[in-house]
């Protein structure tokens, strides 16, 4: 009798997520897997708090008179979106806690994602057969940046207008059809509901769907290929994956991570006024204030806009400006750097083998240099987003701080890259190095199939 | 990691931790009790401190219970052969021909999108200034030169469009007379000038005026413009001056626009 379609579907699903009785799924333990799992926990917290907040939020800029228990805003005419934020914070039971929790979780989310990416790059976890896994990971990070940007617009606070216009100017700066693209996405004048609706649909429907889709793909791939692992003395991780079964180990551990991180986020929400509406105030036409900053994951964009010189270069019909360099070229290079580096390494090293063992960050000079250079550039640009704050703290004119950063943005990545490459070369010459050719290693464990249940 | 961590699957962990049911159930009950109190406090309208602390207590009690499960219910690490579980990477299967075909499709689609965009997109927005438009404040009141004190800044709009974003203009009373390249025929009394409030860098509001050096300053990325000399950029990332609004006086002594803005307000864009 042929197998029922349901049974074969179940079997193929099982194969896909690696949950057949034999071989069992392998869940890695240790610190670094916790980091990537923390991103998933943060996403769960964001989803729960986000759904509750969505019930009370109004994506509209229509002026309304706020009446409620906020003394600062009572009786004032506010954009409906901002008024609904004040209502959530001040008048809805638990609303302020939900808002703070949502913002706190968003920080954890992005920190975990960035840390996971850096570790993946530094250890070579992106190599074959995990090239597609890495590509989905880059997609996840880009979606997360989209969350950060749209999330900041939704309250329609004082910086919303600036954020919107800066994004528009980046569109405008694109050659050939940038103005048209900007006009389609951003044309019209504030206050208008259009931008809020776009941000709202993006933040609450499109980006979550994209994130969930990519996350499922990412996890399926991770499990089909078994996680890459740090080298160990007892087994050869190139041929044997070592980890814990889904049940009970992985499930109880993930549940513990969830409750522990939730407790941490809750405590932070008690102590830190994350993004309280009173700290900002509503959007006002034609107004802006000092220290306007985007969410920190986008600091590298602002930093570039602040320190790239005022260029105005006309080539044919193309006009090259600061915004094109800082808003399109530099971020494009950074993203391409982390997204395409695996292919560069394959091509440069001619290494087409599969790898399951993780390297030491200094094992491959090309990788050590690239990762260090890209990270340093992103870091310097992010710090440059604070030139105004630094100028205030140091009592130095902002022009001098900018000039200093212009030097640093070129010098530091170059120096750091050179240092990393030198360190990697020195490591390669040391006899005790662990960067052995793993293809030559013989499995040291007893026949692993015997140990598997 | 050492081999001692690779344990026999299932059975008690080597530390000898056995499941202590009373302990586990005790902490689970504690978590449930905190959760009940949290729910009551939530709907009773308690503040963020109380709710956050109760929530953290719930989560911590649950964490203690789960930690007990983690250390007692432990199948241990198991080696599993990788053989047969690895597929080749789909990206590796992408050959040169795929790349060429994909690139060709992308170019064609991109060109089509470009042409479509240029055909259908609305024109980039401009301000609503025109010759003769009266300058009004956000409240709709007309403005006279005397309304702008020395070193003062008043934000104005064309009458009928007060509060609209792209037409916002700032009226400044300089300490010293304006000079070229300011359009001097649009300056009243030699010191009253008007510039678009939208930064030519990235479109923020150029919200700050520094009387010391008569400079306009954009808080977004620190572009600085010389208000005496046609709002030409003197520092920061902006490369073109703020558009000027040439001013004139109406018969009743109120200010009107002598012309449209000297350029489109807002960021310059990528087209020469
Ligand atoms: S928008 Fe004014 S300096 Fe960037």
Image (cartoon, coloured by chain):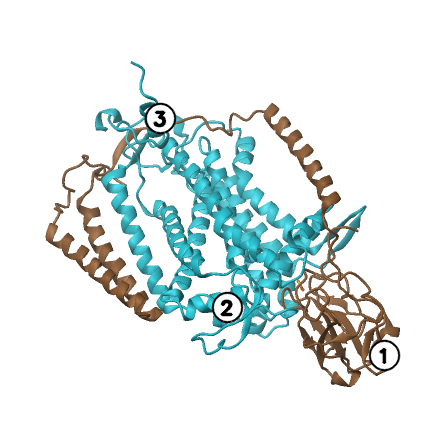
Chain shown brown: that is: B
Quadrant where the C terminus of chain A sits is: top left
* Residue at the disc numbered 2: A83
* Residue at the disc numbered 1: B250
Tell me which residue sits at (19%, 48%) in the image. Answer: B69
Asked if marks 3 and 2 fall on the same chain, the answer is yes
Farthest residue to the right: give it.
B185
User: Compared with residue A86, is residue A6 higher up or lower down, i.e. above or below?
Assistant: above
Q: Colour of chain A?
A: cyan
Tell which subunit mark 2 falls on: A
Image-quadrant location for residue B118: top right
Whether residue A180 is visible, yes or no, is yes
**For this rendering, which residue is in front, A206 or A279?**
A206
Q: Residues within 10 Å of mark 3 (few under 14, many from 20)?
A: few
Q: Is residue A71 left or right of residue B261?
A: left
* Residue at the disc numbered 3: A9
Mark 2 near mark 1, Cβ–Cβ under 8 Å?
Answer: no
Image-quadrant location for residue A229: top left
Asked if marks 1 and 3 fall on the same chain, the answer is no
């Amino acid at each position: 009798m042929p197998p029922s379609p349901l049974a074969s579907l179940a079997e193929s699903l099982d194969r896909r997520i690696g949950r057949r009785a034999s071989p069992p799924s392998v869940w890695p333990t240790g610190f670094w897997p916790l980091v990537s799992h923390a991103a998933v926990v943060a996403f769960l917290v964001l989803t729960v708090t986000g759904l509750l907040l969505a019930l009370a939020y109004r994506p509209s800029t229509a002026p309304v008179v706020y009446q409620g228990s906020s003394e600062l805003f009572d009786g004032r005419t506010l954009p409906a979106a901002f008024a609904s934020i004040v209502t959530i914070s001040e008048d809805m039971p638990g609303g302020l806690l939900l808002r703070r929790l949502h913002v706190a979780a968003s920080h954890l989310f992005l920190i975990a994602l960035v840390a996971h990416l850096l570790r993946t790059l530094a250890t070579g976890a992106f190599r074959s057969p995990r090239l597609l896994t890495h590509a989905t990971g880059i997609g996840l990070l880009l979606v997360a940046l989209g969350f950060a940007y749209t999330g900041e617009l939704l309250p329609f606070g004082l910086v919303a207008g600036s954020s919107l216009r800066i994004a528009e100017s980046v569109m405008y700066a694109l050659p050939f059809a940038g103005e048209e693209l900007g006009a389609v996405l951003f044309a019209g004048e504030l206050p208008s509901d259009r931008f809020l609706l776009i941000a709202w649909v993006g933040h609450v429907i499109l980006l979550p769907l994209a994130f969930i889709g990519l996350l499922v793909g990412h996890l399926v791939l991770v499990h089909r290929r078994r996680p890459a692992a740090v080298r160990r003395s007892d087994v050869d991780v190139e041929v044997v994956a070592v980890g814990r079964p889904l049940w009970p180990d992985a499930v109880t551990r993930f549940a513990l991570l969830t409750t522990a991180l939730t407790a941490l986020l809750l405590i932070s929400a008690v102590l830190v006024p994350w993004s309280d509406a009173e700290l900002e105030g509503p959007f006002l036409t034609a107004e802006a204030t000092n220290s306007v900053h985007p969410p920190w994951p986008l600091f590298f964009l602002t930093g570039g806009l602040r320190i790239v010189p005022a260029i105005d270069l006309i080539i044919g019909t193309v006009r090259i400006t600061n915004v094109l360099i800082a808003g399109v070229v530099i971020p494009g290079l950074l993203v391409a750097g982390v997204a395409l580096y695996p292919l560069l390494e394959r091509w440069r090293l001619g290494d087409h083998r599969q790898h399951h063992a993780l390297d030491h960050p200094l094992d491959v000079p090309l990788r050590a240099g690239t990762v260090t250079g890209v990270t340093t550039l992103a870091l310097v640009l992010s710090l440059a987003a604070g030139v105004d704050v630094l100028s205030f703290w140091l009592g130095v004119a902002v022009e001098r701080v900018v000039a200093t950063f212009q030097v640093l943005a070129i010098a530091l990545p170059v120096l750091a890259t050179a240092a990393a490459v030198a360190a990697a070369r020195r490591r390669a010459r040391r006899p005790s190095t662990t960067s052995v050719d793993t293809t030559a290693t013989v499995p040291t464990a007893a026949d692993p199939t015997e140990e598997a249940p | 990691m050492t081999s001692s961590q690779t344990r026999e699957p299932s059975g008690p962990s080597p530390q000898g931790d056995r499941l202590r049911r009373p302990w586990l159930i005790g902490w689970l009950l504690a978590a449930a009790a905190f959760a009940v109190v949290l729910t009551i406090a939530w709907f009773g309208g308690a503040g963020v401190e109380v709710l956050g602390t109760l929530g953290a207590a719930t989560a911590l009690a649950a964490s203690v219970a789960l930690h007990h499960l983690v250390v007692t219910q432990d199948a241990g690490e198991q080696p599993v052969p990788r053989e047969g579980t690895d597929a080749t990477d789909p990206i590796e299967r992408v050959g040169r021909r795929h790349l060429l075909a994909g690139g060709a499709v992308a170019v064609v689609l991109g060109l089509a999108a470009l042409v479509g965009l240029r055909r259908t997109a609305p024109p980039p927005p401009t301000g609503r200034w025109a010759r003769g438009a009266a300058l009004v404040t956000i409240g709709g009141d007309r403005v006279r030169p005397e309304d702008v004190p020395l070193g003062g800044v008043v934000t104005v709009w064309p009458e009928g469009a007060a509060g609209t974003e792209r037409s916002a203009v700032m009226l400044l009373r300089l300490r010293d007379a304006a000079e070229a390249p300011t359009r001097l025929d649009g300056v009243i009394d030699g010191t009253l000038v008007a510039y678009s409030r939208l930064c030519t860098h990235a479109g923020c509001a150029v919200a700050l005026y520094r009387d010391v050096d008569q400079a306009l300053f954009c808080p977004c990325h620190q572009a600085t413009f010389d208000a005496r000399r046609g709002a030409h950029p003197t520092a920061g990332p902006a490369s073109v001056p703020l558009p000027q609004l040439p001013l004139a006086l109406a018969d009743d002594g109120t200010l009107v626009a002598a012309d449209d803005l000297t350029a489109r307000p807002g960021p310059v864009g990528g087209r020469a």
